[in-house]
Amino acid sequence: MLLLLPGLALAQVPNPAQTVMRDGVTLTQAQEQRAEAIGDQLRCLVCQNESIEGSSATLAKQLRIIIRQHVAAGDGDKSIMDYMVHRYGIFVLLKPPFSRLTLLLYATPVLALILGFLVAWLTRRSKIPPPPPLDDAEQDRLERLLKS
Amino acid sequence: MDMRRRLLFTAPLAVVALGGWGFYTILERMEQDKYDPHALPSPLIGHKPPAFNLPGFNTAPGFSNTDLAAPPQPMLVNWFASWCLPCAQEAPMMAQLAKTGLPIWGIAYQDQPDALTSYFAQYGNPYTKLALDASGLTAINWGVYGVPETYLIDKNGIVRWRWAGAITSDVMANGLQPLLAKYA
């Protein structure tokens, strides 16, 4: 049984030359994987929290077709991304680029870390106040205890 | 030493305060309806519409990007569809705007002539010119991501404003009217 497993794994590796059809566009397995990777990085503008690849909206389907047509034509990932950004702006990118607009977004983890350090530092700094000085009766008792 | 310690303390505090101020501004602007995190700015603003040539409705001719190159006065391009509910909602507003003499050119998005005929019978036709984008591919080139969407085009043919969603009296008073005056 164990001896059969490597053979089984080999059989399941998709053949990169094999063609698949999605949304009416036929691509090779490798091209389809590239198209999916691109679609995963793009926001569906109708639903806004889904990727183009995962959305069932009509516009997302049209954009999937466009991505696949560009992939079939041999266009690079960057030129396909630029095509989308040119039309919809950087909002279409699920991972926005670092810019003045997204500065606060990217700075948030650092801000939280600094705030955490400040809070930790301030709590450590506020020490327990020293006990009030002993009154005369207590002082006498202390001396008696020390002598005995 | 004292100076260095003070700087060590105040510099991170200032950074955090600045960040806090940034977040506070965002929240405050959201509360005042001045900032909508779901709205996306159109990359077309400041540019001419992309090249297109769309057929018209029934026997009337459609229009192309060259027809929008230099309009005699500022105008609107309204993307709509007969199947779209917010479009029917903004129809009275469009009729009101058309009455003021503002040219409104309509582009029907993924629509059928029959459906459009009954839509106009019910809600009126405020459009000076009408084109049909049956495939929706011209809409993608414009960056349209839903209907209705309204674009303001100035006398130089440049897109100055885009509104995604129905035009309400509030949008008209605070968004559109000041710009119409500015680009008149």
Image: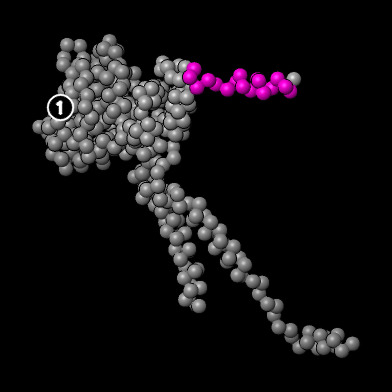
Q: Position of residue B20 (x, y in %)?
A: 45, 56
- When asked about the image quadrant of residue B182, the answer is top left
Q: Position of residue A96 (x, y in %)?
A: 41, 42
Residue A11 among those drawn in magenta: yes
Residue span colored magenta? A2-18
Question: In the image, is A58 to the left or to the right of A7?
Answer: left
Q: Which residue is mark 1?
A: B66
**Regarding mark 1 in the picture, which secondary structure is present there?**
helix
Q: Is residue B153 visible?
A: yes
Q: Answer above or below: position of A107 versus B100.
A: below
Three-letter code, disc 1: Thr
Task: Find the residue positioned furthest to the left.
Answer: B72
Q: Answer above or below: position of B176 versus A130.
A: above
Q: Position of residue A68 (x, y in %)?
A: 40, 23
What is the quadrant of the N terminus of chain A in the image?
top right
Kindly identify the residue that appears in the image at 10 percent across and 32 percent down.
B72
Residue A5 among those drawn in magenta: yes
Camera-nearest residue between A56 and B129? A56
Kindly identify the residue that appears in the image at 20 percent across and 16 percent down.
B56
Q: Position of residue A61 (x, y in %)?
A: 41, 22
- When asked about the image quadrant of residue B57, the answer is top left
Q: Answer above or below: position of A65 versus B4.
A: above
Camera-nearest residue between A76 and B175? A76
Kindly identify the residue that appears in the image at 61 percent across and 65 percent down.
A123
- When asked about the image quadrant of residue B139, the answer is top left
